[in-house]
Image (tube, rainbow, N blue to C red):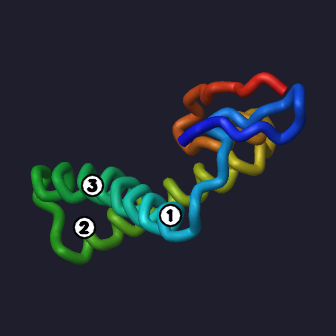
Amino acid sequence: MTTRPVDEHVSIHPVDEKLPALKMATTGLQHVAAMYAGVVAPPLIVGAAVGLSGTELTFLTGACLFTAGLATFLQTLGIWKSAPGCRSSTASPSPVSPR
């Protein structure tokens, strides 16, 4: 993508551009799938290694999904000291465009 000038002195950095709807939907779906796999795999592996039953694995997986969702919610809202207003659930720094 190229940088499109908005004003004579201000331009939008490619990182800040709004993508077309189809590309946003497909990359969003990919992101959700990767996040889901990253949250579900550890409790399944650890739970199976310690010999949990199917019911216990189900409960553990649900608890991990709930906790990940709650952490993401708190992080994006910026409640208390939980990375206030951070747009990334991993709290990694993003490039800042000059404005």
Quadrant in the rendering for residue 95: top right
Instruction: Establish if 10 lies above or below 86.
Output: above
Which residue occupies the extreme front position in the image?
8
Tag 1: residue type? Phe
- Find the distance from the CA under tag 3 to the CA under tag 1: 13 Å
Q: Position of residue 72 (x, y in %)?
A: 60, 51
- Find the distance from the CA under tag 2 to the CA under tag 1: 14 Å
Badge 2: residue crowd in 10 Å (few <14, some 14–19, many ≥20): some
Tag 2: residue type? Leu
- Give whichever of discs 2 and 1 has the lower sequence position: 2
Give the quarter of the figure containing the N terminus. Answer: top right
Quadrant in the rendering for residue 58: bottom left
**Mark 2–mark 3 CB contact (< 8 Å):** yes
Image label count? 3
- Give whichever of discs 2 and 3 has the lower sequence position: 3
> Which residue, given by chain and number where applicable, does mark 1 sit on?
66
Q: Can residue 63 be seen in this view?
A: no
> Which residue, given by chain and number where applicable, does mark 3 sit on?
43
> Which residue, given by chain and number where applicable, does mark 2 sit on?
57
Q: What element carries label 1?
A: helix
Q: Position of residue 84 (x, y in %)?
A: 77, 37
Tell me which residue sits at (52%, 38%) in the image: 90
